[in-house]
Image (cartoon, rainbow, N blue to C red):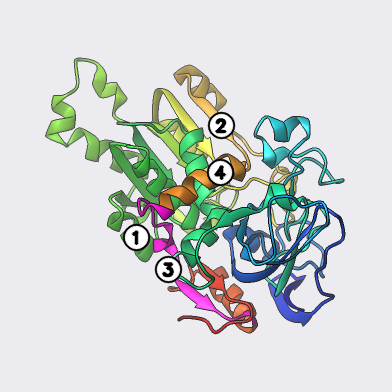
Amino acid sequence: MKAIVYKGPNKVAVEQVEDARVESATDVLVRTTTAGICGSDLHMYEGRTAAKPGMVMGHENMGVIEEVGSSVQQLSKGDRVVLPFNISCGTCFNCTRGFTNACLVVNPEGVSGGYGYVGMGPYRGGQAELLRVPYGDVNCLKLPGEPGDAFEDDFLLLSDIFPTGYHAAILAGVDVGTTVAIFGAGPVGLLAAYSSILRGAAEVYVVDAVPDRLEKAKQIGATPIDFRKGNPVEQIKSIRLSNPLIRGAMRKGEEKMAGVMSGIDAIGYQAKDFGDPSREMSTSVTDALADLINPTGTLGVVGVFLPQDPGGANEAGKRGAYTMPWGKMWEKGIKLGMGQTPVKQYDAFLRNLIIAGRAKPSFIVSKHIQLQEAPDAYQRFDRREPGYSKVLIRPGAAAAH
């Protein structure tokens, strides 16, 4: 089969590799109809992880079942499915409590397994024509419709970034009437904003410096904040305090709550220096959110922080050690949630929102390509070129546009 293979820093290639196949009675074999290129893939692409050449890439995958193992009970050949990026057994201590992001069985290297990603087990990714799905009954979400229909892009996003955006809102305590600030208007940040709106947030601010991303935030009803125009914390506080309706609802002393109740870091360790966006500053977002989140508020971190970063700016960064403003956060009583998304907690419910027409996450999709175009798309995505913010691959079919 053809697949996208990691070759080393800043290089992937389309190669012929051994076909994926059913290896265990609980496996399912899926023919991929759509796979996504994720911002997390760039961590490996840029050589910022311990990934070794030869890995088949891709943890955002969906397709049609071609074969099922003899022990698979609830799925059949021909079923359309999307695969949560977390691979889980479904029966270990963590899985049975809903933490399929921390399965104790599937990854001999540690806690949590996934497709085509460094440190997440021996599983090949789905940027390929075929994909082996372990524990198929657990790891397939059944979908209605036919490949290539109007739901194709929306359903693909159930593999990772729509649940991740929703998880960000949960981690940050977003609820009806909440005020929210999201740093990062990439696909995850935009879907965190979208999820916050779905959950009834009153005000949603999205911080970035890329004009087309900020325009997308505006289109879904969020307030875009361009950090090139000044300190984003002060911009948000100024907007809130200058609104006569917000100010008029404050009792005496409540002007001290001019920030937001919920903050989301959707960038992670490759955050930019707000004063000089050409430089990385891994803690710039968490520092800003510690200032912006009101006393008793909540910080949710879904941006990736890895235990090893060969490209780190200093020795601490290379071993995943980052400073946090613990004193300020403790004084404010800020609650903190972080980590990988347990996709299965959300994917069926988000699927139902899509089916009902109440959610259309595919607004973030910018381009469709064929498999052979992926190396070029990786380069352009890594350069943050317009039109490459969220690229979907159609293995074995002509790209729509």
Residues tagged 4 and 3 counted as in contact (Cβ below 8 A): no
Cα distance in 3D space between marks 1 and 2: 26 Å
* Direction from residue 338 to residue 220 in the image, left or right: left
Task: Check disc 1 and report the residue beneath it.
Answer: 216
SS state under label 2:
strand
Front-most of 137 and 126? 137
| Residue beneath the point at 16% across and 36% down | 243
In percent of width and height, residue 362 lies at 43, 62
Front-most of 76 and 86? 76
Task: Check disc 3 and report the residue beneath it.
Answer: 150
In percent of width and height, residue 400 lies at 47, 80
Image quarter of residue 361: bottom left
| Residue beneath the point at 34% across and 43% down | 197
Q: How many numbered tags mark residues here? A: 4
* Direction from residue 188 to residue 76 in the image, left or right: right
In percent of width and height, residue 146 lies at 52, 69
Cα distance in 3D space between marks 3 and 2: 35 Å
